[in-house]
């Protein structure tokens, strides 16, 4: 009983489009207020980013004789960094999508060629990994086009350039994901990721270390300084980098050099076609072998005796009390059941390599940020600007804190998933489970954020009274943001999903991110406008009012969702 | 039919499937039993093509699963213990989707599929999204979708999980009827009653090895028991465990294992 059926790829596409459409329609069942808020936030971000890019590009372009060179190099640099980030993002998402995805396991025993399964998952991963990139660069390219007064066809052509470009990091990321799955088990991957991260941070910190420029040099030898800057960032115009083809093509089109732009478009097209063909036709068998290896829990390192011996030692060590348990033994005032819950959460996080890898990317970026901060204190002499940078640094640390709470703390309740009854029916009770997760999230994120703010203030050479004030602000924010994340996580649980990224990208996670962002921007602005330093010379009435407003707002935004979450937990039906 | 030829699967130092050779002929209902971590699921994963064997071969309906995967899968149905279904589709859409993947005519669900849908009482659920269904109903949808293309070989891993007694009975009846019509059934289960009642032959796996294969009577004779299958199973696995212990002691007495 056979019939001419459409290709399996088309069937997969149809089914997944239908699923996606129904998910979109399901949004109608959510609160309109929340949907509206998120739409406003997304549009607001696009408008704000567009305005900032427009002002920034105008400012950079206003340097006589140098403006266009600076803008050109900035675009090359931006796309080069985004290329690397896209590569990492594609690696992580492709790995999850290819090897930890139930749809893949469902499809493999069906009469669907492994090439088709890989093809479908490759496209899905590419779209998942690249939408944020498109969302980020769209306002930039719109601002660039408007500043340059480009013709209308610049915009559709840019879309084409970007569509061709995102295929390349997607191919690279998917290839790396299959290689990682084929050769590395969880522990070898963690080791490799740590080592690679450390090497990359060291290389970037060394290569991009700021130049020491005196005020005199800035005034008299601008060309030399600029020359140094261009030489140091020359890697971004390495002609074999796909980001170079994209930046060069877009800029050439804006300048009206259509032949050169078409050349770069063709270079991108030929590479996209070449690597796309490899992905579509040659990776299926390799992917199938890697999928089998992932299930076989074998590793390339398993060939060596030392690794096998180490694995045996680890297996033995797991029979004993682990370091986390021993650590919490020192906290006898924490109840035994709460300790058990916290140790369980820590272990699950540590053993989930995907979460781990994403936090590594975040901390790598933070390390680069921190390494560059000290140069502000050496180069800024105006006390007003030092104050501005100090508040911007507070904002950056707070945004990092919000990233941690939204990405890692918000999904904690949902991650109990179908196992929620285990903790829910224990004498501990769900409200205490929530409070334990709140305490753990606050403890870790506060520790990291305090370390970050103290280190950054030290590198900015700020006085202790200032450092103390910023540390107090970040402490209040840590309690608020964790309360918000835990509370909303319990109010909008997604107990069906095991993947924390997908839990966060749901409605409640996005709402948490929007509220955190608005809270941080509002708080930093309120605190900065009533700053006791520069132009003011000490604490004044407005300072106390601003701190009062900040603390009350923080209590409301942290406590109310947490209380609602606790009540929800009390009423929770398993 | 299913043919396993000196099948071996290693996970590092652990041998999950150890030199398993077995032929399940066309139309036979074969149940594989074994304690946890005996290698049953790994064997199923190799048969269904989810995993490559370290060595040896698995053939389904005459096709090597690794060398001719599409031909083998076209003739195979697999029902895992916790099947994946697309949450936002309705059962009807899902059944149409799997039917088309197996190159069946579009009307197979409305035509020949109706009998299966009726027997598993899915008619009232066909228009609801799968996410709103109970675990047992989802399991029934997965079973119907697996049997829709009239497979030559059906592999089931703990198929009774989540099914109520009525639908467990329906599944047993359907599988028995199909096996009488020529479908080979390979079931891994911990429910000894399923094997006792349904299976033409039973295989017992222990620590990766297929330690015994035969009809209920043959296994009873071999184990030296006369009661229910439970006693036979416990006796055979205990015998195997004792045998291993004796071998280990003998090796130690002879100077220990040769270093690797």
Image (spheres, coloured by chain):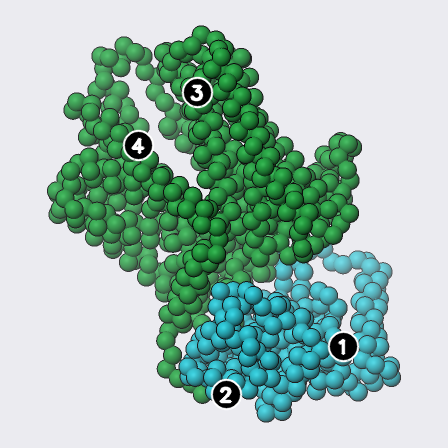
Q: Looking at the picture, how far across and down is residue A371, in whole percent?
A: 45, 25
Marks 4 and 1 sit apart, C-alpha to C-alpha, by 70 Å
Number of residues whose C-alpha sits closer than 10 Å to that of mark 3, classed few (under 14), some (14–19) or many (20 or more): many
Q: Which mark is residue A528?
A: 3
The label nearer to you, 3 versus 1, is: 3
Question: In the rendering, at what x and y percent does residue B61 appear?
Answer: 54, 83
Q: Residue at x 43, y 84 (%)?
A: B107
Q: Secondary structure at mark 3?
A: helix
Colour assigned to chain A in the rendering is green
In space, the residues marked 3 and 1 are separated at their CA atoms by: 72 Å
The alpha-carbon separation of the residues under discs 2 and 1 comes to 32 Å
Q: Nearer the viewer, mark 2 or mark 1?
A: 2
The answer to whether B197 appears left or right of B118 in the picture is right
Q: Earlier in the sequence, mark 2 or mark 1?
A: 2
Near-viewer residue (B208 or A250): A250
Residue B101 in the image: x percent, y percent?
44, 76
Q: Output the chain of dot 3.
A: A
Nearer the N terminus, badge 3 or badge 4? 4
Q: Which residue is mark 2?
A: B112
Q: Which mark is residue A52?
A: 4
């Amino acid at each position: 009983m056979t019939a001419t059926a459409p290709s399996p790829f088309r069937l997969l596409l149809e089914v997944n489009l239908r699923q996606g459409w129904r998910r979109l329609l399901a949004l109608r069942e959510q609160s309109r207020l929340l949907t509206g808020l998120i739409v406003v936030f997304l549009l607001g971000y696009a408008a704000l980013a567009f305005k900032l890019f427009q002002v920034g590009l105008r400012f950079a372009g206003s340097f006589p004789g140098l403006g266009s060179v600076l803008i050109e190099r900035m675009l090359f640099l931006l796309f080069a960094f985004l290329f690397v980030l896209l590569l990492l993002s594609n690696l992580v998402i492709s790995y999850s999508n290819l090897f930890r995805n139930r749809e893949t396991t469902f499809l493999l025993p069906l009469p669907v060629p492994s090439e088709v399964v890989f093809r479908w998952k490759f496209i899905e991963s590419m779209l998942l990994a690249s939408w944020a990139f498109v969302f980020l660069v769209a306002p930039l390219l719109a601002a660039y086009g408007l500043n340059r007064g480009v013709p209308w066809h610049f915009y559709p052509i840019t879309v084409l350039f970007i569509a061709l470009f995102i295929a390349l990091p997607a191919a690279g990321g998917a290839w790396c994901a299959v290689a990682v799955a084929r050769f590395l088990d969880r522990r070898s991957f963690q080791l490799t990721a740590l080592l690679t991260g450390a090497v990359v941070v060291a290389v970037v910190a060394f290569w991009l270390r700021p130049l020491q420029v005196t005020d005199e040099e800035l005034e008299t030898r601008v060309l030399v300084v600029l020359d140094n800057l261009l030489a140091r960032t020359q890697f971004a115009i390495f002609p074999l980098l796909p980001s170079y083809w994209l930046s060069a093509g877009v800029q050439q089109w804006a300048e009206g050099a259509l032949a050169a732009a078409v050349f770069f478009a063709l270079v991108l097209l030929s590479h996209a076609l070449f690597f796309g063909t490899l992905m579509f036709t040659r990776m299926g068998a390799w992917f199938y072998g890697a999928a089998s290896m992932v299930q076989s829990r074998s590793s390339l390192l398993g060939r060596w005796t030392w690794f096998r011996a180490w694995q045996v030692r680890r297996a033995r060590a797991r029979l004993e009390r682990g370091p986390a348990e021993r650590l919490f033994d020192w906290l006898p005032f924490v109840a035994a059941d709460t300790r058990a819950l916290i140790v369980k959460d820590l272990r699950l996080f540590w053993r989930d390599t995907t979460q781990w890898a994403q936090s590594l990317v975040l901390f790598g970026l933070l390390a680069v940020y921190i390494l560059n901060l000290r140069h502000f204190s050496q180069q800024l002499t105006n006390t007003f600007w030092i104050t501005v940078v100090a508040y911007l640094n507070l904002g950056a640390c707070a945004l990092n804190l919000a990233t941690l709470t939204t990405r890692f703390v918000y999904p904690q309740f949902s991650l109990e998933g179908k196992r929620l009854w285990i903790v829910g029916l224990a004498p501990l009770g769900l409200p205490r489970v929530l409070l334990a997760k709140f305490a753990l999230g606050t403890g870790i994120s506060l520790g990291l954020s305090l370390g970050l703010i103290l280190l950054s203030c030290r590198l900015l050479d700020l006085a202790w009274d200032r450092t103390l004030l910023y540390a107090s602000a970040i402490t209040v924010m840590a309690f608020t943001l964790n309360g918000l994340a835990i509370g909303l996580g319990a109010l909008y649980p997604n107990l069906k999903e095991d993947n924390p990224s997908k839990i966060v990208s749901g409605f409640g996670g996005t709402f948490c991110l929007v509220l955190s962002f608005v809270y941080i921007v509002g708080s930093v602005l309120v605190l900065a406008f009533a700053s006791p330093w520069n132009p003011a010379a000490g604490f004044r009435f407005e300072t106390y009012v601003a701190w009062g407003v900040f603390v009350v707002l923080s209590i409301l935004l942290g406590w109310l969702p947490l209380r609602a979450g606790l009540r929800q937990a009390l009423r929770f039906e398993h | 039919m299913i043919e396993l030829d000196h099948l071996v699967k290693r996970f590092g130092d652990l041998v999950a499937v150890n030199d398993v050779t077995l032929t399940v002929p066309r139309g036979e209902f074969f149940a594989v039993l074994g304690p946890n971590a005996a290698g049953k699921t790994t064997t199923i994963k190799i048969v269904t093509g989810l995993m490559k064997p370290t060595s040896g071969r698995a053939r389904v309906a005459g096709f090597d699963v690794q060398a001719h995967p599409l031909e083998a899968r076209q003739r195979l149905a697999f029902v895992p213990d916790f099947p994946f279904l697309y949450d936002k589709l309705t059962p009807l859409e899902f059944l149409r989707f799997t039917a088309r993947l197996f190159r069946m005519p579009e009307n197979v669900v409305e035509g020949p599929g109706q009998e299966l849908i009726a027997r598993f009482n899915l008619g009232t659920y066909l228009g609801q999204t799968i996410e709103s269904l109970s675990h047992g109903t989802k399991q029934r949808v997965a079973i119907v979708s697996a049997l829709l293309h009239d497979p030559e070989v059906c592999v089931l891993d703990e198929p009774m999980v989540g099914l109520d007694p009525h639908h467990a009975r329906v599944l047993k009846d359907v599988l028995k009827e199909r096996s009488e019509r020529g479908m080979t059934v390979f079931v891994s289960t911990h429910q000894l009653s399923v094997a006792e009642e349904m299976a033409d032959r039973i295989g017992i796996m222990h620590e990766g090895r297929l330690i015994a294969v035969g009809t209920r009577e043959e296994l009873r004779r071999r184990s030296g028991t006369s009661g229910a299958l439970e006693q036979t199973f416990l006796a055979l696995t205990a015998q195997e465990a004792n045998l291993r212990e004796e071998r280990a002691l003998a090796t130690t007495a002879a100077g220990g294992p040769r270093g690797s």
